[in-house]
Image: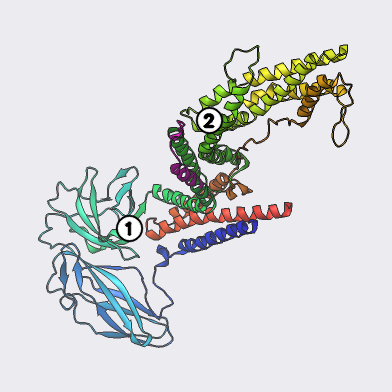
Amino acid sequence: MKLRAMRGVRYSFAFSGLILAALMLGAFLPTDTMLAQDTTAPLSFEDGTPSTVVWPQPLQETVRNHTSQELAVTIQIAGFIDPQTDLALPVDELLQPYAASFSVPATGQTALQLPLQTEHRPSPGIYAGTLSLLAPTHNTVLRKPITLIVPATQDATTTLSLHPAVDAWTINAVRLVPFVRPLCLRGLTFGCTLPVTDELASLDDHIRLGHLSNEQGGGLAVTLAGINNDGNARLRLDFDRRWGYSGSYTGHIGFPGAPGSRNVELTVNVNDIILWPLITLGLGLFAARALQRHIIVHPDLLKLLRRLKAAGDTFDQLRKSIHGYTVVDDFRWHYAKVEAAIKEWDQTHYGGPSEAEKAVFRREVSDPLAQFEQQIELWSQFPEKLARLRRELEHKAKPAISRAERPADTDRPEPSFFTAARRLLDGDKLPLSQVPHYAQRLDDAAEFAAIWGELDRLSEVIRDALRQLHSASVELSESEQLMLQTARHHLNSAARDLWEAPTLEELRQRQAQAELVMARDLTQRLIDPFVYHTDPEPAEVLTAGEAPRLRPLMRTYDHLSAHPTPSLDAGVYPMPQLETPRVVYLERTPLVGEQTLTGVALVIALIAGLQRYFSVSFGTQAHYLALFSWAFGTKAGLELLNCAATRLLNRRNT
């Protein structure tokens, strides 16, 4: 069994190790900085970030060849669509005629320029498209998002002219709740603003300023919403996809009436507040502790719950009332109490217990369960115990009492034990804790009823012998007269105890059995000088005058010698022993306590998690998975090390 338990522990920790290894992979998932284009490909753009073009500026890109041979490249451009209005610009109407392919020299680069049509101005808006370059000889496709900004017409903006006060501007935006729309934050105030040099009294409608994009392909549209009281332009940010909010968005925006050279390079950093990463770390630790509880604590506690349920099922199959005895109400209360103690321990303890926890566990869980099982076992024996008591009273005690001689110094019409035993047959409403006590009382009363007649019969035999000694007119010496008085005293004391003792335990305490033995021994010693035996059959050597007078005394002597002395300890039903449930969980004492280890894991996870939080624009699913995996792996790894160190230390000690 010990080997099987050790194998179970080994398999449990091997299973947790596999889970740890799988989850630790999440910490190495690709992050934002790993999603840039691969420069080891045969073909690449000089600038890998998405491009923004303001109409009518041409579309310009530099393409690099990383191979040792000239590459022929085919151009494909997807249609440009405004996500706000779903307006599409055909490529043949947007771009001037261009060659469908071009070549890039070996280990060199080529500047690609695609002029826009200027004869017909497209509708104002922000259009998203894609530039694709194909190298068929290397089976390579290179794509790059292109944002085309068509500002409002000059006629629509003749009355509005704003000039930015900066060439580059950075806005920090935070998400109060993950995966929802962020809010701009500057210091302790919310709001997306940009300083301008002009004053504007009012703005009738929102004006689209440009479009930003990030490395993950997300984008946001920037709209002029008005001018605040501080003279700064209020910006509205509209994200184009729900799951792409976090990260760093960059691009250029142009204000109405501002020359192209004064376009602002705008950067918007979107980050989740620190509360959610901390919660993710806590969830990782909690998940590791839950797994640890499920492997170490829960199986043993589940066995205890099954034992409790088995005891409850046994009780349900028994009679709810046995000759007036009932424990139903108290049974339900004790069942619920023990069940709650087991479940509470199962939910609040995770690893191997310390010595103090073991003592608490035995006091609050295992010992109450063992007592409960013992009480149910004894309750199942109540019908048999009551039937035995009734049988002993009717067939042994009652006939013996009817023939018994009541002691002269008592006025009781019947022995006290008989009255008390009949009361036990009447039944009562018992608390479950009193079941062992009443079971013992029933056993003692039945045993008392079974041997009372034998004890009383022995006292009658001794009494007859003493009477015959007196009636035979035997001459006794002074010392023999003293022995006779002592024998009578012991006999009267034992007879009175038999009549007055209400329980077998009290009869033992009164030493009634010893009193009878003493009276019998003294009586035999008094008769012995007048009786002579030959072997194998007795023969009297008496004169003719003594024979008729001493012959009854000799027969009484034979009765005394042959009459057995009943034992007050024989035939008592043994009480079920309190068997504490074996719990493998209690056999594990870790080198370092589980709570201490959890605290260490929390500190390590916080240090690593906060370092990651402040090093990236935190908020993607990969970020949260990495933090969760790190917290989980830290706790599980420390537990594995603790278990291995504990087993190694125990092996050395043995």
**What span is in magenta?**
307-328
| Mark 1–mark 2 CB contact (< 8 Å) | no
Secondary structure, mark 2, is: helix
Spot occupied by residue 284 in the image (x, y as percentages of width and height): 46, 53
Is residue 317 covered in magenta?
A: yes
Which residue type does callout 1 highlight?
Answer: Thr
325 vs 286, nearest the viewer: 325
Q: Which numbered marker is on residue 257?
A: none
Q: Which numbered marker is on residue 267?
A: 1
Residue 450 visible here = yes
Residue at image mark 2: 434
Tell me if mark 2 has few (under 14), some (14-19) or many (20+) residues whose alpha carbon lies within 10 angstroms of its own: few
Is residue 406 covered in magenta?
A: no
Residue 408, above or below 186? above
- Looking at the image, residue 53 sits to the left or right of residue 120; the answer is right
Spot occupied by residue 617 in the image (x, y as percentages of width and height): 39, 56
Which residue type does callout 2 highlight?
Answer: Gln
